[in-house]
Image (cartoon, rainbow, N blue to C red):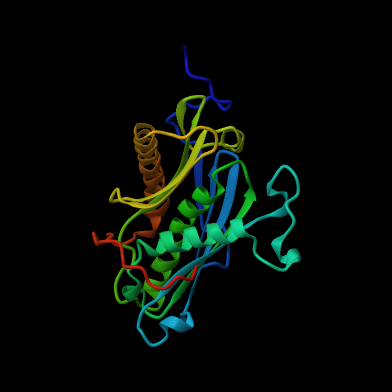
Amino acid sequence: MAPPARADGRANDELRPLLLQTQYLRFAEGSVLIEAGHTKVICAATVEARVPPFLKGRGSGWVTAEYSLLPRSTAERTPREAAAGRVGGRTHEIQRLIGRSLRSVVDLNALGERTVTLDCDVIQADGGTRTTALSGAFVAMCIALAQAREKSGLRGWPVVDWLGATSVGIIGGQPMLDLTYEEDSRADVDMNVVMTGGVRFVEIQGTAEQTPFSRAELDQLLTLARSGIDAMTVRQREALEPFALPPFGAKPLPSKAGTQA
């Protein structure tokens, strides 16, 4: 029996159409509008000459992130979290994911006592918002650091590896790459994977929504995710080519510093 056709006509191992429009915003040091199918996220990077209190005087920098869904990014209006007076659990989780993933490929000592903040605002959501935001945030961060390198001088180029993310899942027994909202909502298994260009895992978030999955299925999903992230990295390289970034150093992932987002 032929595998079930996807609503958008993609092959099971194919990413959604991907667009990265760099310097989308006028005032941010680095920005990108990233579109993965119908999911659209604006990512903006800000570089400031300050660090959190726990890093003051240590000569080390910090990378953090904020994430939000615009009210009409979804089929039904999503209330602004500011109106509720607090950040929701899902938002907090995604912000921490983006922040710690970006820090995993940044030499914080080379950054010096600077903080890079990534603001990721989802303007249209159709699945994969956290992975799309993370992949776009990496591009925006690189652009902002390239600007900082020229204007204020860094100790060195702080980005040590490429970084990308994608979603995978099992639907009707078929492993699939880069799930839409409709696919994610009926998946037997769904998973978010973050990897470096050096093919090292930063994060794996996987859940059996219906039926537990086997080790063999896990391996299938991770292989599928790697192929998608490899394709994402190619597009990131193309988007960043005009900015003439220095070579990325082949260094190990930095040790964990602090627990903040």
Question: Farthest residue in the bottom direction?
Answer: 57
Name above or below for residue 92 compared with residue 62. above
Q: Is residue 67 visible?
A: no
Please state the horizontal and vertical placement of residue 210, each as a whole percent of the image: 54, 33
- In this view of the protein, which residue sits in the foreground, 61 or 54? 54
- In this view of the protein, which residue sits in the foreground, 220 or 103? 220
Q: Residue at x 47, y 63 (%)?
A: 99
Is residue 71 shown left or right of residue 11?
A: right
Is residue 183 shown left or right of residue 143?
A: right
Please state the horizontal and vertical placement of residue 238, each as a whole percent of the image: 39, 48
Please state the horizontal and vertical placement of residue 135, each as a whole percent of the image: 46, 52
Question: Farthest residue in the front direction?
Answer: 212
Q: Residue at x 47, y 14 (%)?
A: 2
In which quarter of the view is residue 142 placed?
bottom left
Question: Farthest residue in the left direction?
Answer: 250
Q: Residue at x 36, y 84 (%)?
A: 58
Q: Is residue 221 visible?
A: yes
Please state the horizontal and vertical placement of residue 247, each as a whole percent of the image: 27, 60
Total count of labels: 0
Q: Residue at x 72, y 59 (%)?
A: 80
